[in-house]
């Protein structure tokens, strides 16, 4: 694992994490902890995690969520490999896993088994569902989005559509981190760890909770976002002569500013439009005029006019545009050497701590690249390590 630069905040320095994960949700937990300074040892099967070899939309999973970690390859079907896993857990502060319910339990790596040897262990399970009738179901990010109402709210009526990133995997991982940090704080007082469980389905429902609350308040079900009645008259994507731009006018004072900025004297003169709710009811009258105005300008002209005014606006960015974004160039991306040797920059943890951003140059480890180093740190002698390699209990790139 690459050493962090001296100026990089490391609030979790000294926290040792062992990670039994794949895909996105579990690795996201480890990546956030590593980005905050924890030492994260990632367990991979002999030959490496299959996530490394995904194609298409999965091709970015491994480099995005496995930076800053060490890699050790273990054969968990062997007694010797399992013994190494238990040794790692016995010396860890935190364990993360996101395999199917019961998978680690059947290997003797349950929370109860490991906490009996290491009572300070915080054991984070990232699952599809919290305990309940659905607990044994297999869930994916998309399954949770469909079940929990997010896909319904994202697509147009009758056409549920998943969000455009693994938003539930990542947010579920973030809730796992929150649980781990809470458990670490409690351990300061009690001296004991605990089991933390985060889930995809309940995370989804938390995110759509605003729409549940809307129903509770109004008695009317929330419409999918493309068909919603906005809380503001101007809160939409507007076509320009070239590229579209989003504009939001979300207060009465901003309405005044917007009208004066774009010389909409007739709209500002209409006192029936001075209050937000009045404007919402008059959207059909207001919006055609605004669309015609913005449609006669280029995106650059619109942005130049709005910049610095306090009016919310946004060009419609694509993921590949973020590599050249001037805001992100100022500490939002960190250099990464991919496992094929290629160089890129990827988003760092989106926080500032004591005036500094987390993040440092990192090299993605080859499968098992740190196996020998990790075992030596556990106190294994060189001859023991050689025997484990010869028995196929551990591996390296």
Image (spheres, grey):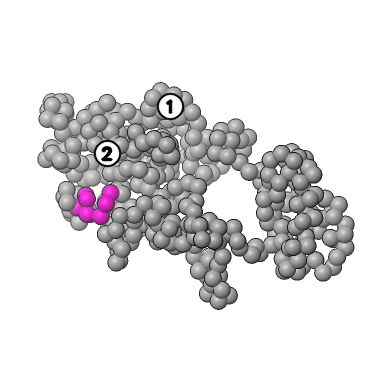
Q: Could you say whether the residue bearing mark 1 is in a helix, strand or loop?
A: strand
Side (left or right) of 36 relative to 275: left
Q: Is residue 254 magenta?
A: no
| Quadrant in the picture for the N terminus | top left
Residue 43 image label? 2
Q: Could you say whether the residue bearing mark 2 is in a helix, strand or loop?
A: strand
Q: Residue furthest top?
A: 341
Residue under the image location 84 percent in, 68 percent down: 271
Residue under the image location 38 percent in, 30 percent down: 364
**Who comes first in sequence, dot 1 or dot 2?**
2
User: Viewer-proximal residue, 96 or 5?
Assistant: 96
Residue under the image location 16 percent in, 28 percent down: 389
| Quadrant in the picture for the C terminus | top left
> Looking at the picture, how far across and down is residue 390, in whole percent?
13, 26
Q: Residue furthest front?
A: 158
Evaluate whether residue 87 shows in this view: no
How dense is the environment of label 2, judged by Cα within 10 Å: few (below 14), some, or many (20 and up)?
Answer: many
User: Viewer-proximal residue, 245 or 345?
Assistant: 245
> Looking at the picture, how far across and down is residue 8, in whole percent?
48, 36
Residue 117 in the image: above or below residue 382: below
Label 1 belongs to which residue?
337
Q: CA distance from mark 1 to mark 2?
A: 20 Å
Please report contact status of discs 1 and 2: CB closer than 8 Å, yes or no: no
> Looking at the picture, how far across and down is residue 12, in whole percent?
40, 44
User: Viewer-proximal residue, 343 or 272?
Assistant: 272
User: Viewer-proximal residue, 20 or 101?
Assistant: 101
Query: Which contiguous range is marked in magenta?
Result: 99-105
Residue 289 in the image: above or below residue 327: below
């Amino acid at each position: 694992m690459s050493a962090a630069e001296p100026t990089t905040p490391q609030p979790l320095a000294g926290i040792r994490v062992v990670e039994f994960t794949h895909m996105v949700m579990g690795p996201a937990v480890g990546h956030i902890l590593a980005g905050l300074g924890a030492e994260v040892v990632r367990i991979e099967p002999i030959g490496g995690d299959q996530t490394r070899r995904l194609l298409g939309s999965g091709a970015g999973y491994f480099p995005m969520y496995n930076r800053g970690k060490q890699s050790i390859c273990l054969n968990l079907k062997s007694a010797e490999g399992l013994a190494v896993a238990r040794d790692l857990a016995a010396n860890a502060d935190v364990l993360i896993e996101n395999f199917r319910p019961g998978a680690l339990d059947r290997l003797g790596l349950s929370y109860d088994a490991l906490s009996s040897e290491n009572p300070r262990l915080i054991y984070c399970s990232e699952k599809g569902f919290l305990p309940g009738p659905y607990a044994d179901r297999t869930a994916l990010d998309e399954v949770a989005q469909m079940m929990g109402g997010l896909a319904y709210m994202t697509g147009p009526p009758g056409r549920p559509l998943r969000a455009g990133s693994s938003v539930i995997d990542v947010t579920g991982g973030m809730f796992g981190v929150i649980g781990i940090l809470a458990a670490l704080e409690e351990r300061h007082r009690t001296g004991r760890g605990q089991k933390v469980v985060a889930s995809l389905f309940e995370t989804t429902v938390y995110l759509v909770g605003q729409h549940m609350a809307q129903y509770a308040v109004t008695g009317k079900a929330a419409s999918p976002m493309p068909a919603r009645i906005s809380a503001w008259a101007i809160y939409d994507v507007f076509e320009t002569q070239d590229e579209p731009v989003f504009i939001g006018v979300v207060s009465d004072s901003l309405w005044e500013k917007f009208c004066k900025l774009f010389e909409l004297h007739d709209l500002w003169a209409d006192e029936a439009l001075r209050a937000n709710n009045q404007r919402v009811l008059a959207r059909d009258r207001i919006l055609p005029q605004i669309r015609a105005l913005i449609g006669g300008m280029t995106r650059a002209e619109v942005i130049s006019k709005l910049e610095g005014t306090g009016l919310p606006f946004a060009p419609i960015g694509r993921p590949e545009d973020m590599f050249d974004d001037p805001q992100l160039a100022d500490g939002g991306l960190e250099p990464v050497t991919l496992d094929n040797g290629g160089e890129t920059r990827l988003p760092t943890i989106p926080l500032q701590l004591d005036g500094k951003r987390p993040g440092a140059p990192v090299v993605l480890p080859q499968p098992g690249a740190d196996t020998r180093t990790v075992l030596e740190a556990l106190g294994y002698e060189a001859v023991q390590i050689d025997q484990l390699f010869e028995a196929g209990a551990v591996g390296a790139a």
